[in-house]
Amino acid sequence: MHKDYEYKSVFSESITDYISSRRKAGFLFDNPAYWLYRFDQFCCSNKIQERAISKQLFETWASKNEPETKTTQCNRLEALRNFSIYLNTVGIPSYIPANLPRPEKTVPYLMTDSDIKEFFEQVDLYDTRTTKDSFKRMAQEYRVLFRLIYCCGLRNNEACSLKTANINLAEGSISVYQSKGRKDRIVYLSDDLCLLCSDYLYWLHNQLGLTPEWAFPGKDPKSHIPKTSVDRKFNEFWNATESSASCDKKPTVHCLRHAYVIKRMNSWMDGDVPLHVMMPYLSSFLGHKGPIETYYYYHQVEDAFRTIKRKDAASSRVIPEVRHED
């Protein structure tokens, strides 16, 4: 399920064709579609009539807005630059900048066991704080959805768009299709998580009176819950914790996946399990291109790790240096 925008500028037809071609190639493409929608609005407001992106138009759009971060600026300019490349391929000469602003390098917040415990306490309390029937249903969905993300290391969009047909309770697994990089994979559930999913799907069937297509339906059961709604709810639950008042950086939904990776790697190191043997399995489990991409999770917050500090003499041999391309 994609977020569709109505484009109205002189570029509307080209933008629609471009987005369609990328999605047919298997890309989600929601973020670029949003920035091109913003660009489309910008063109309408400025009464742009020429169906080509000039250097002046690109640079006017490129001007950094006061509230936005460099990362946000980079994302919207990258979307327009790639659209310019597309226009050139279909015979519409357009300006393609050689370089774009570099995004900010941010170190993610590593959620501790205490943070995780507090967070899920707030998730479970949500049912007691709401009275509407639709919100009551969503409260049950959040309990399972966030646990799947944390316990299986799922990406937010993978959990949101999970179909009931792709949950195999007999084998205790879920199938993730066409995720990032157009990868498919099978993720296995622990016994207690499989039981939770079984109880949840039985409850969901009774609530809706039929077997829904989506494991986590939105307020309209015909569609799955939007990723943006999960982002907002994560913030709400986190802000209700005591930990939120003392942390210097706000975590995101992705931090649950990050915490899963770190906890798994620390567990192996504590048990003297050879990482070079296990990392290919963890990489496949997460849907990464390879172990190096998974190692990067660890290096992002290297200073925070008790295991690396305790095994400092061996860490350079166990965990290779990772150079991440911008």
Image (spheres, rainbow, N blue to C red):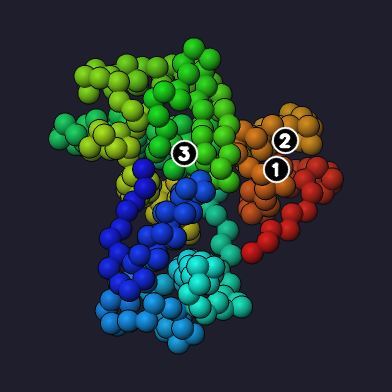
Q: Which amino acid type corresponds to the residue marked 3 in the rendered image?
A: Glu
**Of callouts 3 and 2, the N-terminal one:** 3
Picture quarter with the C terminus: bottom right
Instruction: Find residue 280 and report its image quarter.
Output: top right
Label 1 residue SS = loop
| Closer to the camera in the image, 68 or 73 | 73
Q: Is residue 314 left or right of residue 204?
A: right
Q: Earlier in the sequence, mark 2 or mark 1?
A: 2
Three-letter amino acid code of the residue under disc 1: Gly
What residue occupies the far left of the structure in this picture?
132
- Residue 270, percent across and down? 72, 33
Element under disc 3: helix
Image location of residue 292, percent across then percent down: 72, 47
Residue type marked 2: Pro
State yes or no: discs 2 and 1 in contact (Cβ < 8 Å).
yes
Q: Is residue 74 depicted above or below 109 in this figure?
A: below
Q: Residues within 10 Å of mark 1 (few under 14, many from 20)?
A: some
> Few, some or many C-alpha atoms within 10 Å of disc 2 (few <14, some 14-19, many ≥20)?
some
Circle 3 is placed at which residue position? 158
Q: From this view, report whether residue 4 is shown above or below residue 113.
A: below
Give the crowd class for mark 3: few <14, some 14-19, many >=20 residues within 10 Å.
Answer: some
Name the residue: 56% across, 24% down: 188
Q: Which mark is residue 290?
A: 1
Q: CA distance from mark 3 to mark 2?
A: 21 Å
Figure quadrant of residue 262: top right
Q: Which numbered dot is residue 280?
A: 2
Q: Distance of mark 3 from mark 1, alpha carbons? A: 19 Å
